[in-house]
Amino acid sequence: MDRTTRALPAGILLLLVPGASLPAPPVLKTVYPPAARRGTETQLQLVGGGFTRETRLVLPFAAEVRGGGSNSDVAVFSLKPAADTPPGVYPVRVQTAEGISNLRLIAVTDVPVILAKGPNGSYRNGRLRLERAQRIEWPCAIAGGRLVPDVDAFRFSVKAGQRLVFVTETWRLGLTPDPLLRLRDARGRTLAYAHDTPGLQRDERIDYTFAKAGEYILELQSTGGTGWTNHYLVRLGEFDYARAVFPLGGRRGEMVPFRVVGRDGKTSTVKAKVPADPWADHWRLPLGDHAGSLPWLLASGDLPEISEDEGRDGPQKVAWPVTVNGRVGKPGEEDLYRIAVKPGEHVRVQVEAYFLGSRLDGYLMVYDPAGKKLLAKNDDQVYRGNPDPALSFEVPKGVREVVISLRDCMGGGGIDYGYRLTIERGGPDFYLWLGKAQNGFRINEENEAWFRTDASDTLNLPVGQEVRLRVSVRRSAKENDPYYAGPVQGYQGPIRLKAEGAPRGVTFRPAIIPAGKTEGEMVCVAAAETPKDPFEVVIVGEGTRDDGSVIRRVAERKLFLSDPQMIHLSWNWRMQKLVCVTAREGR
């Protein structure tokens, strides 16, 4: 029995080693069940390829682990997360002497994990066969799979007046099913139904108070999904959950009071220090009093932060650069901000909402102060697979002030329509991708969807050998993105690449992506004294505009962790730090 070492998320890469064959790292296809209870032993089955008898689990939390590789395709581990592990979603990988695998996700819970037994649900003549429902005791987390074309059903008992919450943690675990929940009484009549619950990013939640004591049925279906990750996880119990958190982030290193709105509208305050890590722009806030919610994803930034003045009359005047923490507080509301500008100045405006748990589907517009001339508009960042809007514009002659407008595309509003609106200097800009270029809305020139463009999401370094790390650059909107309005706006100069955080024994040679080019490579070499445990590296690109200002961007990767058939879904895991490990020398 041993305690696992620390490993963290990474970005997707393409590895090339001239003149030598790379050792094949392990590949991880699925983990089942996709959950383990803290302080309790759970048996996990990992399916993939390239496993050996020395295969070990790599986790970012303390745990007792026994077992390992049994053959090249299957490894069985007994996992006991430490009792003080915060409940949440974590990356899991496997490591062999040949390197480290891609990641999958696992949930750590504080309730028992029950495995679905089959067959436990089916339809006959259009009616659910209630007698097949599997009996369970709550609170619990149910792990199951193969929902297409099957149906899973679970029978449980309640007392009169009890209020239960049923919530899936499926899409947010990178699993394939797009679940539907249906609550039935003992005769099969539908009491509640949920599909695409707002704010849960295609996961579902039912909150129900039972008027009568007795037995009831929870039914799960899915609108689609196949492949290795066709599993699900659903929790049920008397959980409070967070409807909203405000603000949706803060400035790095600062202590921020976050207001958490519970299921019944009760507000509590959680004080937390925003991580000071300069290379990560997102983090997770644990919600210990709201067990029906996962830790809340929040943003971190470098700019001054202010809050929306909700009681104002007319546009709120703000000094920029700045991040405004606001909320579209009621249906049909339009939030307006007035900023001073200079003719010829470039301004960049971005909204963060959807991936921070907000229901806002934002629509950005910029006007002259009289409201007569529309200067810019946008409702999403198309090629980044992001439903949050962003734009960049140049201030025309004679304009000294502009008004920025943000509203919900569907006219919605409420306590769970929060946002972060960042206003900063714009101008020529670029994005960097680890590996090949990404695009969430089209098939690329190689006839591959963007989440399949690389074979792994780690960097394995055979000792003493050169490995070439591909970095792609997006310089401007292209013809296949006709609706893209920013913020990438045509930087064409050279981009200097460098690595931050490499340990002793590892060399990342600085490189330059020439002017106008869309790809570059860094050469990486690991010496014998390199640490054997996984380590993180950040790849940074710097460009210089004509006016001498420097643009600095971190190379990132957005991962779609489910199987490629589910191309209608956005990314669900974002990487800004590259996980590396030394590997056995090539043969």
Image: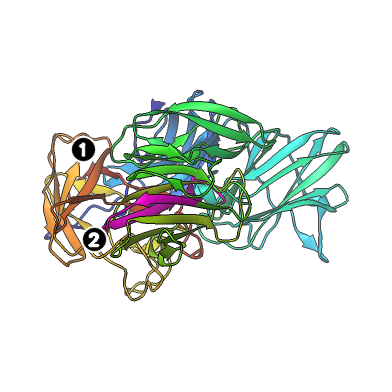
Q: Secondary structure at mark 2?
A: loop
Q: What mark, if any, has residue 428 been given in the picture?
A: 2
Quadrant of the image for the N terminus?
Answer: top left
- Residue 72 visible in the current orientation: no
Q: Is residue 67 left or right of residue 231?
A: left
Q: Residue at x 51, y 49 (%)?
A: 314
Considering only order in the chain, which callout, 1 or 2, is on the residue closer to the N terminus? 2
The magenta region covers: 336-359
- Residue 452 visible in the current orientation: yes
Q: Nearer the viewer, residue 338 or 363?
A: 338
Q: Residue at x 17, y 67 (%)?
A: 516
479 is higher (above) or lower (below) than 226? below
Residue 461 position in % (x across, y down): 20, 47
Q: Which residue is mark 1?
A: 501
On the image, which quarter does residue 317 sit in? top left
* Disc 2 residue type (three-letter): Pro
* Disc 1 residue type (three-letter): Gly
